[in-house]
Amino acid sequence: MAMIEMKDVAKKYSNGTTALRNLSVNIRQGEFVYVVGPSGAGKSTFIKLMYREEKASKGKINVAGWDLIKVKNRDVPLLRREIGVVFQDYKLLPKKTVYENVAYAMQVIGKKPREIKRRVMEVLDLVGLKHKVRMFPSELSGGEQQRVAIARAIVNTPKVLIADEPTGNLDPENSWEIMNLLERINLQGTTVVMATHNSQIVNTLRHRVLAVENGRIVRDDHEGEYGYDD
Ligand code: ADP
Ligand code: ADP
């Protein structure tokens, strides 16, 4: 079954920039996929279409059984339960504690306090931050903040985890820790799509590689290489 399916997708921004052109791809349940390519190639746009942060100008997109062309704005929160997202700059809520940052994602979908408490502690244990539940993001290292962001992204057990340059602000040691986590999450059955400029990671921890250039997929290799010199 395809977890993410795009067919003849194009994206033209309102200022006239064409970011993606006639792009088609199939990603199956449980796959781990790297998205690589030069800056400005369209990687972020490609990823944003998957969680309906941007709308396609043309084509078909289906994610976790949702037709993203037809999905109504009011249903986007429902869709987002099935898709966890992690960003390069973490995007944690600065005035909330670690616990609250993670719990919030469950509160907004109306989960019961008892279930929230159990699940939040479970995912914070998974990312190794159970002992820092009362801290604020500003009191954590970059690597720890990204682990909180991952805990938040998976707390509602999404089918797909999307990560846009998740190690972009981290040193090699913390980057590998984040990769270990994404790897474990993937082994539990979650489909992972990760845009990255980290050639070390792509060339060491081998997975499918989609290379995007000038709004097109120019390479799609099983256990592929990073393939750029940057
Ligand atoms: P990448 O992630 O590979 O760096 P992007 O998807 O961010 O590429 O960008 C692809 C192209 O779309 C670039 O030319 C970029 O300038 C343009 N672009 C990205 N976001 C917007 C936007 N919100 N409005 C207009 N153009 C954009
Ligand atoms: P440094 O900080 O000197 O880059 P690291 O501990 O980050 O050292 O990694 C050293 C090498 O070991 C890396 O180049 C990488 O290839 C490999 N490595 C480290 N952690 C992992 C891991 N979790 N999985 C696979 N390879 C790893």
Image (cartoon, grey):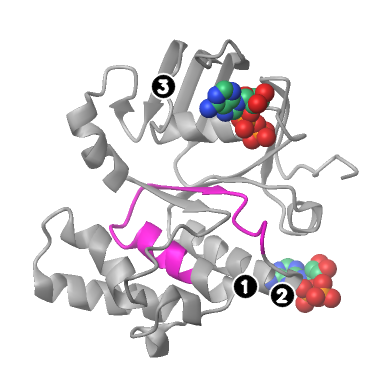
Instruction: Evaluate if marks 2 and 3 touch, with contact meaning CB atoms under 8 Å apart.
Output: no
Q: For mark 2, does the 10 Å Cα neighbourhood hold few (<14), some (14 to 19), or many (20 or more) residues?
A: few
Q: Which residue is mark 3?
A: 55
Residue type at tag 2: Glu
Q: Quadrant of the C terminus?
A: top right
Gap in angstroms between the C-alphas marked 3 and 1: 33 Å
Whether 103 is drawn above or below 62: the answer is: below
Queried whether the magenta region covers residue 158, the answer comes back as yes
**What is the x, y in percent for residue 209?**
69, 39
The answer to whether residue 25 of the structure is visible from this angle is: no
Task: Say if disc 1 is inside 8 Å of ligand 2.
Answer: yes
The secondary element bearing badge 2 is classed as helix
Task: Say if disc 2 is inside 8 Å of ligand 2.
Answer: yes
**What is the x, y in percent for residue 4?**
45, 31
Whether 77 is drawn above or below 14: the answer is: below
Task: Say if disc 3 is inside 8 Å of ligand 1.
Answer: no
Task: Describe residue 82's horizontal placement relative to residue 171 as left or right.
Answer: left
What segment is highlighted magenta in the picture? Answer: 147-169
The secondary element bearing badge 1 is classed as helix
Gap in angstroms between the C-alphas marked 2 and 3: 36 Å
Residue in the picture at 91% in, 43% down: 229
Q: Which residue is mark 1?
A: 177
Instruction: Evaluate if marks 3 and 1 touch, with contact meaning CB atoms under 8 Å apart.
Output: no
Residue type at tag 1: Glu
Q: Which residue is mark 2?
A: 173
